[in-house]
Image (tube, helix red, strand yellow):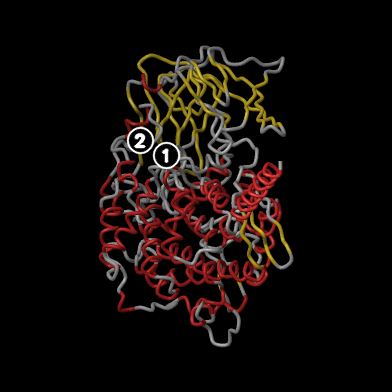
Amino acid sequence: MKTKIFLTSFIFCLSCAVAQSCAMAQQKSLSLNELHDKIAGAWIGQMVGNIYGLPHENKYIDNPGDEKDFPYGYRKNIDKLKKYNGAFSDDDTDIEYIYLMLMEKYGIEPTYEQMREGWMYHIRDRVWLANRAALGLMHHGFTPPFTGDKRYNPHWFQIDPQLINEIWGYTAPGMLSYAAGKSAWAARITSDDWAISPTIHYGVMYANAFFEKDIRKLITNALAYLPNGDRYAQTVREMIALYDKYPDDWVKARQEMAEKYYVNEPEMTKTIWNANLNGACGILSMLYGKGDFQRTMDLGCAMGFDADNQTATVGGILGVMYGAASFPDVLTKPVEGWTEPFNDRYINITRHDMPDASIKDMINRTVEQAIKVVEQCGGKVSGNKLVINTKATFNPPLEFCIGPMPRLEVGVPVDYYFSCVTNKDYTWGQTIDKKSTFPEGLSWGHGNIYGTPTKAGKYPITLSLIDGKKTIKKNFEVIVRTPNIAPLADSIITNVSKVNKDVLFKSWITFGKPMYADSVNVINDGILNGTGSVFYSLAAHADIPKIDYFGYYWKTPKKINSVALHAGCMEEFGGWFSSLNIQYLDKNGKWKDVGNYTSTPALPKTDIVFFQPHFVEFVFEFATVETNAIRILVDTKVQSHWNKATKGLSAFTSITELSVYEEN
């Protein structure tokens, strides 16, 4: 009997020990002073890297920067630091500051809709590439992740999310899974597919840097949070292999990296801002920097391409790893008389209604948010220590993601997904009220509309989304159109039928060359994006101001009451329009306006570039006209800044498709 009691007691004690050991394995602790010092390191390290790297941005492409010039120093930016008597905002730090304000306003896990509101209010200029495309889609009515979806954001593969999302990692100390999930969620605001992976990887490194000081381990451990077969994960492994191959020669490693991921990059994603390429530059600078902050900054610049991004990102990681106290004064107090890093001043020169700040205050506010993240995820403050649940995960907020309505035409099969990657696991419902019916020929299931519509019309539907705790509902209207008659046209009517690619490729283009079509004939081929889908009305010369027109002629008359314009991708220097008119050919062979028309959705409120969405469709409805020809006319937007650089060629239209529909 005693033996049984002893055995039972032993098993019980062993179970308790195992349970306690498992609990300890899920927890890590950090003193509040350490937390503060490391978050200070994140902010100050990013500011150093951003301002240090700016003079080298896009400067070294074919060859790296010269090591003979190390240390580079702040160069011309020292005058700017003196001018503002402190650090100044740039897109490597200012959007994160906005995210801090959104966390304070809405809680530690804002919704995509709240992020959209923050973007549209605070960000009114000084964004480029995927960020600019996302902002235009937000003004168009989209929420993330549709704003980063490769079908609508043609810059989905660019660097943008790497430089604006580090805050999700350093407000999740030691919470690697949580940092990975939240970083991925945020990266999809602007990007898609493998281009979000560097953001996840760097986010995990930020979270892990609170406890890990081995650079190589930091890099390799974070790979576990990337998908199997991920392109960027393989790139990182190759960077480690290059470092091992050339441990004392970063130039050779950079040469092989650039050859593969820039020179031989597939044409569609070959840009100097490619996310994979620049992510690799950051990894090499960390490996060869070996934890030395000054050398890592110089290497980040010398690696080239979008240099200020990698210096800012890795600068913040080293700041978390070693703390703010580790930074050399020459980088944090470069102006005589400064006694605090950047004189404790962060001056806003980039964002609307973003207040200047004390850097100390920014750090303190971020510490508060980090503590809230830890507490909400099962951790706690115990005395002067922060106890962290390292196994915490991120679950996206329950919300509808708003993108384009399904493009439905009678007789054309469709499979449209209302959901998105961040809410696909929730339960969907669909309600039909007494006044509406579901489109004939279509079915509904778990966020999908599928089938082949048989009857044109407008159909209101109510959808619900359930996460097990609460249910949310939203009303939508789907439109089933009559068959598109544009492909049946006998001829295309336009003022520019061939793009002048000599002129185009000498301009500051931002997309891969395969995107551009040679001829206007693509506007009725049914292909909305991808290779050869986008026509630019760019001729050998331009008359300013310029009016473009696109339309069709049929030998037999048609009764037309709507046309749909599907915009293409826009460049920094043009591609959109200021106004639009619709005309038809009357019986006397003269062009006449169709009169009033409605646009679904509404056209942009302004012709300012930051409001222009890529790859979206506008449906224009008007009173039926019987005619052999119809066309749209647009006043192309002239960009005064770029007009000089392009010698009058900034005025052109980007279009992928023009569809035409007869009355039902």
Residue nearest the viewer, comparing 90 with 106: 106
Name the spot of residue 214 as percent of width and height, x first.
45, 66
Look at the image and tell me whether residue 638 can be seen: no
Report which quarter residue 455 is drawn in.
top right
Label 2: how many residues lie within 10 Å, few (<14), some (14-19) or many (20+)? many
Residue drawn at x 32%, y 36% as measured from the top left: 532
Determine whether 71 is above or below 393 in the image. below
The residue type indicated by label 1 comes to: Gly
Q: Are marks 2 and 1 in contact (CB under 8 Å)?
A: yes
Left or right, 328 with respect to 552, comes to right
The residue that mark 1 highlights is 568
Q: In the rendered image, which quarter contains the N terminus?
A: top right
Q: Secondary structure at mark 2?
A: loop
Left or right, 145 with respect to 573, comes to right
Report which quarter residue 631 is drawn in.
top left
Name the spot of residue 499 as percent of width and height, x first.
30, 41
In the picture as drawn, the residue positioned furthest to the right comes out as: 383
Q: Secondary structure at mark 1?
A: loop
Name the spot of residue 41 as percent of width and height, x first.
56, 70
Residue nearest the viewer, comparing 526 with 564: 526
Determine whether 496 is above or below 157 in the image. above
Give me the C-alpha separation between circle 2 and circle 1.
Answer: 8 Å
Look at the image and tell me whether residue 293 can be seen: yes
Q: Which mark identifies residue 303?
A: none
The residue type indicated by label 2 comes to: Ser
Q: Earlier in the sequence, mark 2 or mark 1?
A: 2
Left or right, 296 with respect to 619, comes to left
The residue that mark 2 highlights is 533
